[in-house]
Amino acid sequence: MARLFHVPLSPFCRKVRLSLAEKRIECELAEERYWEPSPDFLRRNPAAKVPVLKIDGKTMSESAAICEYLEEAYPDPSLMPRGRDERYEVRRLVSWFDDKFHQEVTSKLLYERVNKKIMARGFPDSRNVKDGAKAIKFHLDYMSWLLDHRRWLAGDTITLADFAAAAHLSSLDYISDVDWNRSQSVKDWYATIKSRPAFRSILADQVPGFPPPAHYADLDF
């Protein structure tokens, strides 16, 4: 059985979890306090970051590389389209959420509100929280524009781009930092992806000291 060293609200870990679940790969989850790295964990990943996946006799790190490996080793169902241009668009959007969205939104909301307390690194920076709350509006509007032209974020089929976006938004939704009333198309998209079997373990996450809102696991939120 595969084993994933993770943190429940990490969007990068959630992206890998969603990929594993969508491909129906059985996986054991092991929470890892990566900010207090043990010698064993540093041997698995000297960068002291999650996710780390043990699968097929290998130990892998970095969520993008892990997801690419899973796509090649377990191609059914595919999370990447066949066409070269379409595959580029998926990779572009995955990068958008894992880089731009993460820097402008996730790191300023989730990390300030949750990670600092868990890691005992002080109180939230109100300026960062304010900047993150402002920036997420732009990203939701961009997603709305994409969904006005496509069935899914990158095209006509669900892809890794949708899971990357859902990983970030679900982490933020856990702390009620997503205004689902801003865009009906984004809300409908999230309701659809949230109802997939792959999302069940994500919706069951519980972080001590941070209870999720009532709508978090509600498929008809």
Image: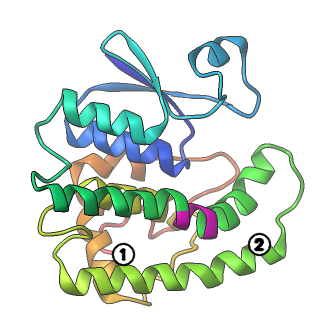
Name the mark on residue 128: 2
Q: Residue furthest right?
A: 122
Magenta span: 100-104
Front residue of 196/36: it is 36
Q: Which of marks 1 and 2 is nearer the N terminus?
A: 2
Q: In this view, does 53 lie to the left or right of 131?
A: left
Q: How is the structure coloured here?
A: rainbow
Q: Is residue 101 magenta?
A: yes
Does the magenta-highlighted stretch encompass residue 86?
no
* Residue in view at x 64 percent, y 80 percent: 133
Residue 49 locus on image (x, y percent): 62, 33
Which image quadrant is residue 174 in? bottom right
Give x and y (percent) for residue 69: 30, 31
User: Which residue in the structure is indicated by mark 1?
Assistant: 221
Q: Distance between the residues labelled 1 and 2?
A: 28 Å
Image position, residue 52 (x, y; %): 50, 27
The local secondary structure at tag 1 comes to loop
